[in-house]
Image (tube, helix red, strand yellow):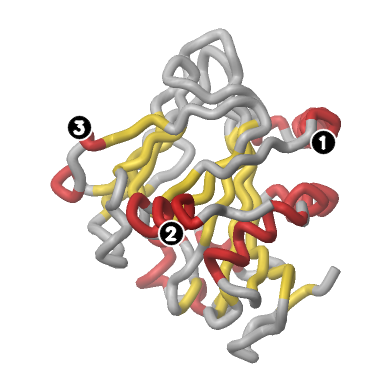
Amino acid sequence: MLLSKLQLEQYENDGYVIPDFKMPEYLLKKIEERHDKLLDTHPEFKNYCPAILHYDESFIEFCKNEIILNYVEQILGSDFALWNSSFFAKPAINGHATPWHQDGQYWPIRPLATCTVWLAIDDANVENGCLRFIKGSHKDKKLKNHNINDNKNLTLNQELDKNEYNERDAVDLILERGQISLHDVYLVHGSEANKSSMARRAITMRFMPTSSVFDHQMVKDKNLFSKLNASKYQDRKIYQMRGIDISGKNNLTYI
């Protein structure tokens, strides 16, 4: 199963695409069970776990889905690695919002490049705070101005300056349980709080071409990363998924 020509054009033009794919139900149940176990030992992640593989490496099973990897290869090329997976649990009633942002604002990857796969564990809709995209906002391939927002009811503390986007251009990413989307590293996106009676759980999988370098040393530059809580990146494992390390500079883990 591959992305069609039209789907690839949509990714290029809009910055995201929803493939014709659903994760099998038995795998979704495994994800739920493992996440429940994670919360038993780490209740602080009831809204958001920024690096789930650091706490339970078995989640990599879901990131290695061959159909998903085929999609990623179409976008990034044949040489790429998985550098992170996060879990957005967004529980019912008090699920935290995610401010408008660009993913690349947070990441020590040079040159900056990532395709994010977003897997819906629950139905995602307007009521429970689905993801929202500013269609086409990736096209200039530039990081826009962000400000620090330390509101504890947000999953992230970097918020895009309001002059950098027009919320009237936003589109809702409405997905059924098991569906996925793929989006570009420069795409502006966010989500509202979940005040509904339904959870909106999701896993993200972050893939980068190995022509880029995940710079573990860059996070030591306090001018760049001191306000981004980036110390967590210093020991981040980078998992080779397909091909080779084009840069020759990545510290890769082979599984």
Q: CA distance from mark 1 to mark 3?
A: 36 Å
> Residue 150: which disc?
none
Mark 2: secondary structure: loop
Tell me where residue 34 sits by quadrant: top right
Who's the residue at 57% across and 44% down the image? Answer: 19
Q: Amino acid at mark 3?
A: Arg
- CB atoms at circles 2 and 3 under 8 Å apart? no
Question: Looking at the picture, does residue 237 appear above or below residue 244?
Answer: above
Who's the residue at 54% across and 53% down the image? Answer: 4
Q: Amino acid at mark 2?
A: Val
**Pointer 1: what residue?**
27
Sequence-wise first label, 1 or 3: 1
Q: CA distance from mark 2 to mark 3?
A: 21 Å
How busy is the neighbourhood of tag 2: few (under 14 within 10 Å), some, or many (20 plus)? Answer: many
Mark 1: secondary structure: helix
Sequence-wise first label, 2 or 1: 1
Q: Is residue 116 left or right of residue 35?
A: left
**Pointer 3: what residue?**
168
Who's the residue at 47% across and 69% down the image? Answer: 113
**Pointer 2: what residue?**
185
Give coordinates of residue 249: x percent, y percent.
62, 88
How many numbered markers are drawn?
Answer: 3
Give coordinates of residue 93: x percent, y percent.
52, 12
Mark 3: secondary structure: helix
